[in-house]
Amino acid sequence: MDKPEDAERAFYEAFVARDTDAMMRVWAHSDAIVCIHPGMGRLKGVEAVRASWAELFGASRAAPARLQIQPLSRTRSQRVAVHAVIERFATEGESGLVFAVNAFHRDAAGWHLVSHHASPGWTETAEARGALH
């Protein structure tokens, strides 16, 4: 991928498609990669990260029907980029947001994800939205 933004876009496309193979093409092929899903522990290495995405994508409520990414900050050097974003999602009956930091590294093959750290924001169910209106 020519730019870290390309890698980030491919990451979220794989996420929405629930495609583990496409997801892992975004990640660097290194045992140093790290992924932290909201409310979960730290996963390190290709096999642990792959297994987590495969499990997440296999769960019935894993992928949002709609996903919007709101950039908060972007920092970039020649070989490293760090993006802080808000992930706004909506599934049937539920919406919410997650705060995430994505770190990318550029090597001879292009830009790849080396770290994804996502923290829960808030979740709102359809019932709660109806009660508020």
Image (cartoon, grey):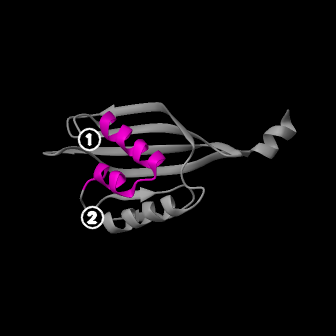
Q: What is the x, y in percent for residue 75?
A: 34, 33
In the picture as drawn, the residue positioned furthest to the left comes out as: 108
The answer to if 27 sits in the magenta stretch is: yes
Give the label on residue 49, or none. none
How many other residues sit within 10 Å of disc 2, few (<14), some (14-19) or many (≥20)? few
Label pair 1/2, CB-CB below 8 angstroms = no
Q: What is the x, y in percent for residue 76?
A: 29, 33
In the rendered structure, the answer to whether residue 10 lies left or right of residue 15 reads: left
Q: Quadrant of the N terminus?
A: top left
Q: What is the x, y in percent for residue 64?
A: 56, 46
The answer to if 58 sits in the magenta stretch is: no
Q: Which residue is mark 2?
A: 31
Q: Quadrant of residue 59?
A: bottom right
In the rendered structure, the answer to whether residue 40 lies left or right of residue 126 reads: left
Q: Which residue is mark 1?
A: 80
Q: Nearer the viewer, mark 1 or mark 2?
A: 2
In the rendered structure, the answer to whether residue 115 lies left or right of residue 78 reads: right
Of mark 1 and mark 2, the one earlier in the sequence is 2
Q: Quadrant of residue 32?
A: bottom left
The residue drawn where x is 48% and y is 46% is 16
**For residue 57, above or below residue 120:** below
The residue drawn where x is 64% and y is 42% is 96
In the image, what residue type sits under mark 2?
A: Asp
